[in-house]
Image (cartoon, rainbow, N blue to C red):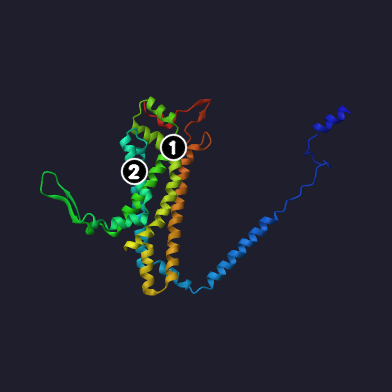
Amino acid sequence: MADRAGAALTRPVDAPGDSELLPQVRIRHWGRWVAGLVVLAVLGLLLQAISQGDIDYDSIPALLTQDVILEGLVDTIVLAVIAQAGAIVIGTVVALMRTSANPVLRWVSWAYIWVFRGLPVLLQILLWYNIALVFPTFSIPIPFTDAYLLDQPANVIMTGFLAALLGLGLNESAYMAEIVRAGLTSVDRGQTEAAKSIGMGPAKVLSRVVLPQAMRVIIPPTGNDFINMLKGTSIASVIGFTELIHAANALSSRSLAVMETLLAVAVWYMVVVSVANVGQYYLERHYNASIRPTGTRGSVWAKVGGSLRTPPFMRGSR
């Protein structure tokens, strides 16, 4: 009896020709099919309603290449890129001040973030655009002389582009400061102590140890903020800066093709944002190489023959 029980236990369950195996029954997910059909039906009704609107879709391709629209597209990209680049630089400096041992630098950086995150972007742009009411002229005297390096009326210097750049860039720099600070604090403190123990200075520790690892945390929200910056440039239309929305309003006021012009602008926004998404994807993949499995490109510690390879930030530091 025991031998039979033992034979039954040791017999493979998936042996071919085993008559005791139960037939596999495929589960039918009816809910998925119903949900998919409902979504497709709603999309079909929406597309049908849009197609019946009073919109001349054939004129949209021609509107895409209008001079005023292309000018607005270029101004939008230039404004967004410069504002984001300035925000990254200023935000990094403010983040380093926030993590400094100096209490004055910490409090000043905290106040900076508090002010520029607390005020709406539109309000900041309007404040900069009307700065002439507070400072009629901008003057930079040359020391020990009667000459001036800069002496111009504020209305001449504070153009629509500069006001939009300051409003968008300084507002974004406050958010970038918190993003960079989060990335810096995500790096284990033991790694900085190990780098200092082999003679690295603070600047070298930051550039070769902390920042390369912090970029994995910094890149995703920075990419999202840049996409928001591309769309946020539309706020500058209130001060007459010729970005895409202002260009669309100027064109539609002459041609009266309001929806067609807005749809053309929507196409350009989607193109620019899609390109930014691709760039963000490759940046994230590049900096995530350091957390791939051991032995792949970019790994910091890799086992070779039972021993640990020297980390990249320690090579060449002796």
Q: Residue 172, image x and y in percent?
A: 37, 49
Dot 2 amino acid type: Ala
| SS at circle 2 | helix
Q: Quadrant of the N terminus?
A: top right
**Res. 75 mark:** none
Tell me where residue 49 sits by quadrant.
bottom right
Q: Earlier in the sequence, mark 2 or mark 1?
A: 2
- Crowding at mark 2 (Cα within 10 Å: few <14, some 14-19, many 20+): few
Could you tell me which residue is drawn at 38 percent across and 74 percent down? 255
* Towards the viewer: 251 or 18: 251
Q: Is residue 46 left or right of residue 174?
A: right
Q: Quadrant of the C terminus?
A: top left
Q: Which residue is mark 2?
A: 111
Above/below status of 187 relative to 60: above
* Towards the viewer: 95 or 44: 95
- Crowding at mark 1 (Cα within 10 Å: few <14, some 14-19, many 20+): many
Could you tell me which residue is drawn at 41 percent across and 31 percent down? 313
Q: Residue 310, image x and y in percent?
A: 45, 28
Q: Are marks 2 and 1 in contact (CB under 8 Å)?
A: no
Q: Which residue is mark 1?
A: 213
| SS at circle 1 | helix
Whole-number angstrom distance, CA of label 2 to CA of label 1: 28 Å
Q: Is residue 193 visible?
A: yes
Dot 1 amino acid type: Gln
Q: Is residue 78 visible?
A: no
Q: Is residue 144 left or right of residue 56?
A: left
* Towards the viewer: 97 or 227: 97
Q: Residue 22, image x and y in percent?
A: 80, 44
Could you tell me which residue is drawn at 42 percent across and 47 percent down? 222
Tell me where residue 270 sits by quadrant.
bottom left
Above/below status of 146 relative to 244: above
